[in-house]
Image (cartoon, rainbow, N blue to C red):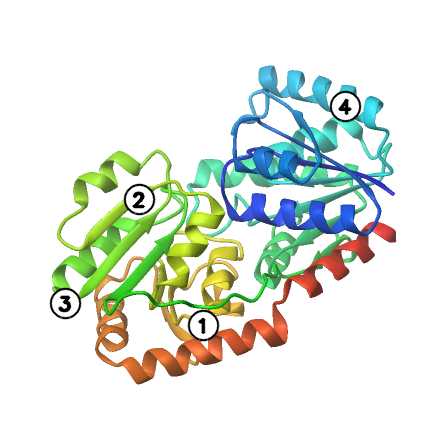
Amino acid sequence: MRILYTITKSEAGGAQTHVFQLSKYMKEKGHSVAIMSFPGGELEKLAKENNITFHPNIYFRNTFNPIPGLKAMKRIIEVASIFSPDIIACHSSIAGFWTRLAIKNRIPTVFTAHGWGFTDGVPKTKKLLVSLAERVAQKYCNRIICVSEYDRQLAIKNKVAKEDKLITIHNGVELFQREKTDNNINIVFVGRLSNQKDPELLIQAFGELKESNTNLFIIGGGEKEEKIKRMGGDNIQITGSLTRAETLNKLKNADIFVLTSNYEGFPITILEAMSFGLPVIASDVGGVSEIVDDSVGYLIKRGDKEELKIALKELITNKSLREEKGARARKRIQESFTIEKMLEKTEQVYLQ
């Protein structure tokens, strides 16, 4: 089987990790694989290091503007004619939209939604635009994979597609080992510093606690990076964007993982943190409640600083609680969210 993956950006991120996981697995299974994305990011680097063909599409931008969109479509058609895929697997809203409009299911197409642009927390104008775009694009694909049941139900509620076209396949990750190298309590946040995330809330809550021997690491780049750097202070390190390998090294030496967000799909970063055996504090948005509960951490209301401070204080001051929740978090990954399950279920969708 010849599989062409398309995704808007190749920068470090959860959706890009997902596409690389799939591409590597399918190649190892003997399938021919190619990836198309905006060039210059970690996904392109990983693809080339693993001898996976990478086709740049410089017209993939975070916009539904038809001028770059039509150019992106032309490039998609060009690459499809060269690679001759048996199936196209498109990921992320923009690449997913233009890919489906370009191919019109003349080649069997599967779209994976890594969270919807009309979820709670998204501005109303964007919600309307994305929901309309998805209702048009859904006509041109065989199946739509949702990475959480929350997203599947949201798609049904918004009449994006019929129920039998939508399937939930949760993200999955490898199992990792923690390797503590210091006696400090290290709190880690990983996420693109965009309006989707709320690292400001975490920085404010952490700063007000003033706990000794405790460090906060904010990992990620994006349009809010300079603003976030100005908020830094004692025991707060803003690293900027890191490679996935560098991020995993930070998680390896962490004690607590926090993801404060305005909206989400089903974050791979939470799964990776839990795989390391870290307790998680996360905003109760999107599909996060399908992986995080009080047995493995804390779900807090979106934007609730006081609730966040209470959760942080309990984990910082109680080592046995951190270890208990962390052990249950790792066990949950082993039982329900392994990378093998995700890969096998996705391959079955491709073969249908």
Residue 78 horizontal/vertical position (percent) = 77, 19
Q: Residue at x 39, y 83 (%)?
A: 324
Q: Residues within 10 Å of mark 4 (few under 14, many from 20)?
A: some
Q: Earlier in the sequence, mark 1 or mark 2?
A: 2
Which residue carries the number 1 mark? 277
Q: Point out the frontmost of discs 2 and 4.
A: 2
Which residue carries the number 4 mark? 79
Residue 271 horizontal/vertical position (percent) = 51, 63
Q: Residue at x 64, y 57 (%)?
A: 152
Q: CA distance from mark 1 to mark 4?
A: 42 Å
Q: Amino acid at mark 2?
A: Thr
Q: Which mark is residue 239?
A: 2
Q: CA distance from mark 3 to mark 4?
A: 54 Å
Task: Determine whether the residue tagged by mark 4 lies in a helix, strand or loop.
Answer: helix
Which image quadrant: the N terminus? top right
* Foreground pick, 199 / 263: 199
Q: CA distance from mark 2 to mark 4?
A: 36 Å
